[in-house]
Image: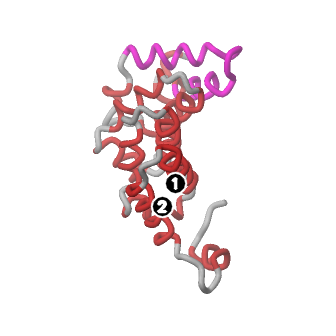
Amino acid sequence: MFTNSQRQEERTGKYGTPRVQYLQELVTQFQNASAEETKEKIVANLANFAYDPFNFTFLRQLNVIELFLDCLTEPSEKLVEFGIGGICNACADPANAALVTQNDGIALVIQCLSSPVRNTVNYALGALYYLCDASNKEEILKPEVIDAIKSYAAAGEVSTSFSNLAQAFLDKHIPQLN
């Protein structure tokens, strides 16, 4: 799970590919891919690397956060799902969250709340939980966003994960509702 330099060296061995090089290869493959399914698999793979703090610096160095944001503008629901999943995983780190905000990603994340794909909505809720701070509360805590999040919080019979995550967001960022 969470890696450090020593653990990474043990796992890859003496002749293994260093993590940053492997991630660079994935980014290059994505950039060169023409098939939608190939791009989806690569973004899903990158999103899986985005949960581990060991990779955060590499992801920033390789502009993977921006790649995830670009995926949110694609017509492919899978690319959107995996892109927002990567953002959700990465933005627990304040530096990654700042990159999302600096690259006008808040509006893209908010758009994901209306996706027909359940995972996309869940990841958007998780990302907004971490993204919302004093610098961007006005952008995130708009009435229409709060209404959408309240509706997910009330939808416990439809999806417990939506309900719990939405309620956690409301508890943290709008405590006066309780």
Q: Nearer the viewer, residue 56 or 112?
A: 112
Give the SS element for disc 1: helix
Q: Please tell me which residue is depicted at 57% across the width and 58% down the height of the picture.
A: 52
Image quadrant occupied by the C terminus: top right
Type of amino acid under label 2: Leu
Q: Nearer the viewer, residue 86 or 78?
A: 78
Mark 2: few, some, or many residues within 10 Å (few <14, many ≥20)?
A: some
Determine the main secondary structure of the stretch shown in magenta: helix
Q: Is residue 145 magenta?
A: yes
Whether the residues at callouts 2 and 1 have beta carbons within 8 Å, the answer is yes
Give the SS element for disc 2: helix
Say whether residue 105 is left or right of residue 37.
left
Q: Please tell me which residue is depicted at 29% across the width and 43% down the height of the picture.
A: 103
Percent across and percent down for residue 8 are 61, 73
Image quadrant occupied by the N terminus: bottom right
Say whether residue 9 is left or right of residue 177.
right
Q: Nearer the viewer, mark 2 or mark 1?
A: 2
Q: Which residue is mark 2?
A: 26
Pick whichever of labels 2 and 1 is earlier in the sequence: 2
Which mark identifies residue 46? Answer: 1
Q: Is residue 19 magenta?
A: no
Residue 60 occupies which quadrant of the picture?
bottom left
Q: Is residue 64 above or below residue 113?
A: below
How far apart, in angstroms, are the residues tagged by discs 2 and 1?
Answer: 7 Å
Q: How many marks?
A: 2
Q: Is residue 131 above or below residue 67?
A: above
Mark 1: few, some, or many residues within 10 Å (few <14, many ≥20)?
A: many
Residue range in magenta is 143-169
Type of amino acid under label 1: Leu
Say whether residue 132 is left or right of residue 102.
right
Percent across and percent down for residue 6 are 61, 78
Percent across and percent down for residue 129 are 49, 34
